[in-house]
Amino acid sequence: MIINHPLLGPRDATEFVYLGDASMIERPNGFGEDVADAMYEYVYLRDNPAGEHRELWYHEQGDRSWLVVTRNTLTHEITEVALARDVARSKGRSK
Amino acid sequence: MNQPNRVDGGQIDRATTLKFQFNERWLTAHPGDTLASALLANGVRLVGRSFKYHRPRGIFSAGSEEPNALVQLHKGAALEPNTRATTVEVFDGLYATSQNHRGSLEHDFLAVNDLLSPLLSAGFYYKTFMWPRAFWEKVYEPVIRSAAGLGRLSGKPDPDEYDHGYLHCDVLIIGAGPAGLAAALAAGRAGARVILADEDFRMGGRLNGETYDVGGIAGADWARSAVTELTSMNNVRMMARTTVYGAYDHGIYGALERMTDHRADSGDKPRHVLWRVYSKRAILCAGATERSMAFGNNDRPGVMLAGAVRTYVNRFGVAPGRKVAVFTNNNDGLRTADDLRAKGVDISAVIDARKGEFVVNTTGRKGLKSVQLNTGRKIETDCLAVSGGWSPNVHLSSHHRGRPTWREDIAGFVPGGELPPGMTVVGAAAGTLTLASTLSEAHETATRIAMDLGKSRATGEAPKARDEDFSTAPIWHINEGKNRAWVDLQNDVTTKDVTQSHREGFRSVEHLKRYTTLGMATDQGKTSNMLGLAVMAEASGKTIPETGTTIFRPPYSPVPIGAFAGRARGKNFRPTRLTPSHAWASESGASFVETGAWLRAEWYTRPGEKGWRDSVDREVKATRTAVGICDVTTLGKIDIQGRDAAEFLNKIYANAFLKLPVGKVRYGLMLREDGTVYDDGTTARLSDTHFVMTTTTANAVLVFRNLEFARQCLWPDLDVHLISTTDAWAQFSVAGPKSRALMQKVVDDLDLSNDAFPFMSCAACTVFGGTSARLFRISFSGELAYEIAVPARYGDAMIRAMMAAGEEFNLTPYGTEALGVMRIEKGHVAGNELNGQTDARMIGLDKMVSRKKDFIGAALLDRPEQTREDGLQLVGLRPVDANVNLTAGAHFLSPGDPEDMAHDQGWMTSVAYSPELGHSIGLGFLKRGRDRHGETLRSFSPIRGQDVMVEVCSPHHIDPEGERQRG
């Protein structure tokens, strides 16, 4: 596969490490009362779609960017690649 | 000339004669010959024995689809089994033998299987050998195993070299027959970057085997001129002997180029190169494969595909027989007779199945003698050319989601469904089975594709040819006569096996394939799949498209494992990482152990030491009584800087880090989000905004990856930056009561008194008069200890200088074993304890875990399993009988309890012999362990055969108050 890195252009998938569902960006607060259920869902529950999937790839043999790659799990077509940092900010994550 | 079957013509160099051996017999050939054509030229018809019944077999085809003529090449370590004689180029001195027989090829003892064939039908090993049960393992399986398989491996390491390579192009053209050449000419003239790959050593495909004209000249000559034109274009890369074996994602194709198989001497070149081809577009011009028909005893040497017979006579100048009969269901087969007659070969009969004439049986055990027709007519013949029509080579079109669709007019499957993105199929592979149409289709398609890619130079006109008269009738199986009719020659699958499979309920084609092994092995059913499908359809009363087809997966034809491995073999499988003191350690008697990719000294043998225990005990004693030194460079080192670095670490570690003062080091415990212990290490604060983290050797890469994840994905606005400095610093642990005196001597201008530089201090400093360094007062051994880091390039000089400086203190190098002994003595956890199931409570670090902040792992600390009252806790163990050596992995039982899991109390994680205590010690996890110090338990290991009594104690076997390391 070829991943079109937003900063570096097309790179072979062998340069990357795959993590999984991009929902891992949306980590709930882990401190306070009643956080366990939200964290349980965050840690253990994943959708397994046959079709479009947003997932995290790490350019380990490259610039060490974490990327959010939108890939069709049936065709492996990649329709969007974004820096995970930008995605995280767009989800309201900051410090 | 001793090649009795040579006839005129052909694309061989008759001026040169090559000598080769087959079954120890010297024969001759010419450059341009394959092993198959050379054997046929020499009149060798019997070349192998079949897989299951050991039937005599000959050459069946003239290409990579060959199911029968599998031979072994070479001798010794280079021996290569299951090679298709039809694709092997003859060179001077080639050594080949037949395979799959006991005794000689002519007299194979295992031919008895043919008489036992009623016992050996589809799925026989599930049925015939069921009783008596005990016989399976001892008798049946060993016998079947030794009889099974085809060729034999050498059992020696592969002596050849293989390489990997990467290519990029606008258009990859797969196959250099008429379609591929026409497409390449058009795309190349248009200015596109083209790769043209063909599995054959001579490009031209069927044009070399037929007598068609193209552009007013003989097809083979046109092919040669096309190759000349293409070779002259510097935007075209011509790759003969290259099989494109798989279509992968995003226009990437796998290709195997055979560099030296056709030479006696590789000349230091790699044998094969496995190419990864990145293409914008691909044109599949893979052609079509001829298939047979099923009739009685259709597997004898001399029964061949009609197209192959034409190839031998036209391309190689070899007559596969002297009196040839043709049996066909299409017009294409009729041309065989014309081509043979033109070379002076006698035609004994042309049997056209469409006229109701069928071959029903053959005779001639080791070579065809006659064929019997349904009309009762018997024809003497030594070669039967059979054509059951052509199947488009759709393989690569279905490597993704494409599913072939049926075309009644050609009685074959053509590419269908969703093709790999960027792929277009033209010519025979697309079902265009006639020449003129193929050439114009290829030309126009390639021109259009080049245009799409912005390459619009003129491409000229499509080569001119005539469309031959091709019409075929779907006749597959001659259902007359009682003799076995073969569907799959390579796997010895007959029509009876297919109908039996249907009877027994294996009706899906995928089940049929697995139950009968139809279409498996080296040829992947290239000549047999359609026939099997047709017989299955007939048995089930369905049409062929209703019956379906199996799906092709890569590789198109076999790829050696060595080619996939490339240069990543043996020591080159992964890089070896050497510590900065490696050269010095090698000179100093070190034995090395692999830890991940690293080689670390495990102990240093001194003269007179009889075993590793002598060395390790000495190293531990010397360290605990004087001073020892150990290279700890392999621990992961991560440099963390930024205004928010402290806050970042506070989110990463389970314990507090915000208020760590500058110049101090703290032990850090890292959890997974599920609350399980992930890694540990120390982190030093060099300035307000600068930290240095250490990780375990094993997790160095993973921790760094996770920190980047946290930094970029979880807290993207923290001002923090990371870099791995594991390889940048050579780091040594200096431990023991005399370590302060040694370090004071080594370090420039830094007061190391306990008041000025207490336990858990750190500082940037210089050593040996100006070499920059970092000093940490941390201890894994439990002794007064330091870790000193210098830039990695000074690591070798550093260890030598340290050893010289330490001579007066009896400085002793120690390895990973002594390190392990000392950490077990001290009760420090390591990989044996932190095995991915351990939480902070189990190792007694729960008080250290902060309850006042969010950090990775904070939310799931208190799950029921982690908070149960009888949870496992880290304890120390010592044998009641001091002479006993404890066993790791042993389980703890209360005395008198039965030996079962219901009464299991925990297990021993680490053991060592403590030179200081003079007996074996252990660490382990025990239910409610902290409350049970002093209790006596059974340590029970049925696997190691140990059952001894142990006393539970503190995990801190020595210096439980930590006075030494603080002193």
Image (cartoon, rainbow, N blue to C red):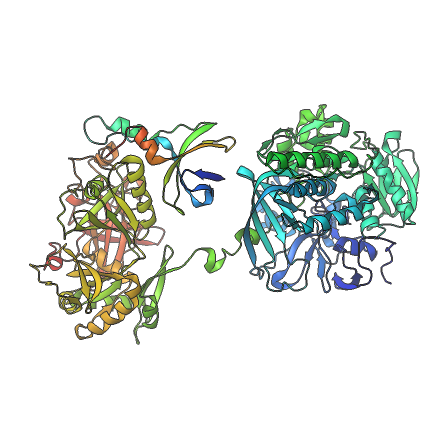
Q: Is residue B573 visible?
A: yes
Q: Is residue B844 left or right of residue A25?
A: left
Q: Front-most of B64 and A85? A: A85
Q: How many marks?
A: 0
In this view, B636 is above or below B540: below
Q: Front-most of B510 and B236? A: B236
Q: Front-most of B691 and B504? A: B691
Q: Front-most of B915 and A72? A: A72
Q: Is residue B558 left or right of residue B383?
A: left
In this view, B458 is above or below B958: above
Q: Is residue B826 left or right of residue B520?
A: left
Quarter holding the N terminus of chain B? bottom right
Give coordinates of residue B378: x percent, y percent: 92, 40
Give coordinates of residue B325: x percent, y percent: 88, 42
Q: Is residue B103 left or right of residue B783?
A: right
Q: Which residue appears farthest toward the front when viewing the image?
A: B457
The quadrant in which residue B125 appears is: top right
The quadrant in which residue A36 appears is: top left
Give coordinates of residue B626: x percent, y percent: 16, 68
Quarter holding the C terminus of chain B? bottom left
In this view, B763 is above or below B737: above
Give coordinates of residue B584: x percent, y percent: 32, 70
Q: Is residue A43 visible?
A: no
| Residue at the spot 56% in from the left edge and 54% down from the top edge | B562
| Residue at the spot 33% in from the left edge and 71% down from the top edge | B589
